[in-house]
Amino acid sequence: FPGDMYSQDAAADEPEWVKTEREQFVEFRDKNRDGKMDKEETKDWILPSDYDHAEAEARHLVYESDQDKDGKLSREEIVAKHDLFVGSQATDFGEALVRHDEF
């Protein structure tokens, strides 16, 4: 896909992000080393089997909302970032918030 986002100019050096993407492709994405991504390689790239989406979203919510950096969220911190929680899959896009009186 870097070819779709970057057209190489013979006179210019390749940007660092293109080099990084090329390395990622060679080292991790093209598992059978045929120079292209087949259906299974693409599936593993989009939905990696070893990635826990719920945990990642929960970590993101805590990281973005924990203003005092104590590793816990207070009611005030959640309310201050209400828009973040309402837009999150972890709260079922806000539905989980209306089921709790404390929020």
Image (cartoon, rainbow, N blue to C red):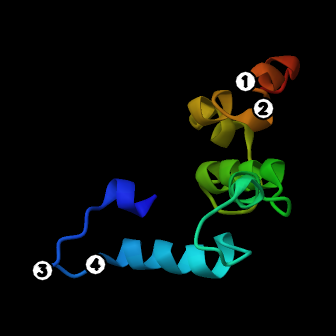
Counting from the top left corner in percent of width and height, residue 64 is at 59, 51
Question: Helix, strand or loop at disc 1?
Answer: loop
Measured Cα–Cα span from mark 3 to mark 1: 51 Å
Q: Position of residue 102 (x, y in %)?
A: 83, 27
Instruction: Indicate which disc residue 36 carries.
Output: none
Quarter of the picture containing the C terminus is top right
The answer to whether marks 3 and 1 mark residues whose Cβ atoms lie closer than 8 Å is: no
Counting other residues with Cα less than 10 Å from the Cα at mark 2, is it few (<14), some (14-19), or many (20 or more)? Answer: some
Can you identify the residue that label 2 sits on? 91
The total of numbered circles placed on residues is 4
The amino acid marked with disc number 4 is Glu
The residue where tag 1 is placed is 94
**Residue 14 badge:** 4
Residue of label 3: 11
Report x, y in % for residue 33: 67, 78
- CB atoms of marks 3 and 2 within 8 Å: no
